[in-house]
Image (cartoon, grey):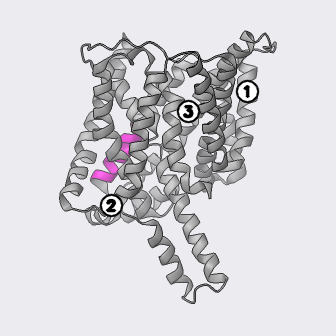
Amino acid sequence: MMSRYASYFIAALLPLLLFRWFAPDLVGQIDFWLLWLLAMVLVSLPVVYAEIALAYRSVEAPLAGMQKLTREADASPIWRGFGWLAAVVTIVIAALVISGASSGMLAALMELNSAPNLPHFAVAGGLVVIVVLLSLLGATTLPIGLGLIIIGLLLGFANGLPSIDFAMTNITLSEWARAVALALVSVGAGTGLYWFGQHLVSKASITAVSSDQQSGSFTNTSTSSLSTGSAQTKLPATKRVLPIWILQLVVGVVALLTSALSLPPIGQLSYWFGVLFVASYLLHYSTQQLAHKFGLLVSLVLTLVLVAILAVAVPTIWLVGLLVIVSSIAVLLLSIFAGWQMKISHLRKALNFSSEALYNLWRVAIRLVVPLAMILAFVGWVLSWSS
């Protein structure tokens, strides 16, 4: 049942997890807010539409779905790289927040005079094992994580809101790069999480229809039952996308305003424990994707090893850079495949827009606007890193 709402939980949770890595020093800049809103409309929205459209067309999870779609479009297997990169992006996000959680928890325990005599890498390694075990619970960890994060933030509100001095500054490519990162990585666009969420909804609906038929509720054939289940999930894409995108926008505003919020020790512990529960779902997603190729047990071990290496051995600032690079490539692959490789008739039918004009606007955005925006953002990151 919880899998039906996984996409909405992810839309609400990722900004609360990741905005602190990109936004605190820019939160008072009005031009940054405007760039972020622009990126949400021009970049994030078309990409989420693309994910849902490909989910509808493939009726599979991202990795398996890309194999099916590339065969259908007679496209090069290189485009299947999106499925692999999407799994890698979630692993990097999980490693980043686990590394942050280990530091944050140690700092909170030190304030409470209860810090264990353990190095950071040992704590991070222990948290990786805990999170991988929690990933076996699937989407049930998401509401727990959201509740703990909200409790932590509310305890921070009790200490008072941070003072923000708003001012207009010069617009730079570096600001655009951070705005795009917030509009994509921090809301999960291009990670395949919404594609996977739609797959869970479709699978649950088909399972429910099949169960009804077996219990005698329907007398149709198995084929017609599965068709009915599929039809129940294929609402117009807008009815799937807009609630997710609006939720991202609202929570994103809250996350920006609270990204510099100071939490008391108990609030920090509550927040970071919530982060670990959310990270477990990210690893559940990546494990399920890799399982399509390697099997569940091998994928679980592979995920554990990769996250442990990244969280324990790689500095946080490098993880942020790796996240930006891998996610940018993933979004570029997705946008070019959806815009240039997929057949027009297939995507038009999958999106089911109310008018041809809306479909044409989306197609221009996914073919031209998104790739150009991503290239400019990557140039901005390179300039930022070089300086």
Q: Is residue 102 visible?
A: no
Q: Residue at x 35, y 20 (%)?
A: 382
Position of 211 relative to 314 (above/below): below
Tag nearer the camera, 1 or 2: 2
**Magenta span has 277?**
no
Residue 274 horizontal/vertical position (percent): 65, 33
Helix or strand or loop: what does disc 2 sit on? helix
Magenta residue check for 333: yes
Q: Is residue 298 left or right of residue 278?
A: right
Number of dots carrying numbers: 3
Q: Is residue 173 left or right of residue 297?
A: left
Q: What distance separates the C-alpha of mark 1 from that of mark 2?
A: 43 Å
Residue plotted at (21% across, 51% down): 361
Q: Earlier in the sequence, mark 1 or mark 2?
A: 1
Q: Quadrant of residue 25?
A: top left
Magenta range is 329-339
Q: Is residue 293 left or right of residue 129?
A: left
| Residue carrying label 3 | 92
Identified by mark 3, the residue type is: Val
Mark 3 or mark 1: which comes first in sequence? 3
Residue 36 position by quadrant:
top left
152 displayed left or right of 223 = right
Residue under numbered circle 1: 125
Mark found first going from the N terminus, 2 or 3: 3
x and y percent of residue 48 in the render? 38, 48
Mark 2 — residue? 351
Say what amino acid the circle numbered 1 marks.
Answer: Gly
Looking at the image, residue 167 lies above or below residue 357: above
Q: Residues within 10 Å of mark 1 (few under 14, many from 20)?
A: many
